[in-house]
Image (cartoon, rainbow, N blue to C red):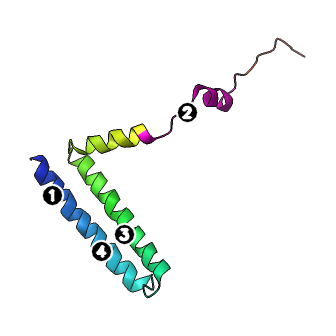
Amino acid sequence: MVPFTKIGMASALMGVALYLPMKFLDFSVFDTSRVIPLLLLTGTAALAGSAVYLALTWAFNVEEIELFYKLVRKLRPRASQQDIAVAAPETQHSNYTP
């Protein structure tokens, strides 16, 4: 498949993954007449849709999503050598035997 088709299929399924939880949670869980529950509903649906989209683009081997993954890897903080040394101190062995 061409990348455009893969991205289109992932986007369509993401739309379903956004719509279904939004309708279900709006009907049964959140009272969207208030601002905070509406924001929680929107955030929940957005997280579900984003997760589905990223999973599908990974499953479809969409090459363009690798740019996003590389960006995330670059932005992720790395442990310095000093942090590693503090986290795992060397054990000292003694020759003491009782």
Q: Which residue is mark 1?
A: 8
Residue 46: image location, x then y, percent: 36, 66
The disc label shown at residue 20, or none: 4
Q: Residue lying farthest top?
A: 95
In the rendered image, residue 20 lying in the magenta stretch gets the answer no
Badge 2 crowding class, 10 Å Cα cut-off, few under 14, some 14 to 19, many 20 or more, is few
Query: Is residue 82 depicted above or below 64 in this figure?
Result: above
Residue 72 falls left or right of residue 5: right
Residue at 49% over, 78% down: 36
The type of residue carrying mark 4 is Leu
Query: Is residue 86 depicted above or below 19 in this figure?
Result: above
Residue 86 falls left or right of residue 78: right
> How far is disc 4 from disc 1 in space, using C-alphas?
19 Å
Pick whichever of labels 2 and 3 is earlier in the sequence: 3
Magenta residues, start to end: 75-90
Q: Which residue is mark 2?
A: 79
Residue at 30% over, 52% down: 55
Pick whichever of labels 4 and 1 is earlier in the sequence: 1
> How far is disc 2 from disc 1 in space, using C-alphas?
38 Å
Mark 2 lies on a secondary structure that is loop
Residue 97 falls left or right of residue 84: right
Mark 3 lies on a secondary structure that is helix
Mark 2 and mark 4 in contact? Answer it, CB < 8 Å: no
Mark 4 lies on a secondary structure that is helix
The type of residue carrying mark 2 is Ala
Residue at 39% over, 43% down: 72
> How far is disc 3 from disc 4 in space, using C-alphas?
9 Å
Looking at the image, which is closer to me, 60 or 79?
Answer: 79
Residue 25 falls left or right of residue 8: right
Q: Residue lying farthest left?
A: 1
The disc label shown at residue 45, or none: 3
Query: Is residue 21 depicted above or below 30 in this figure?
Result: above
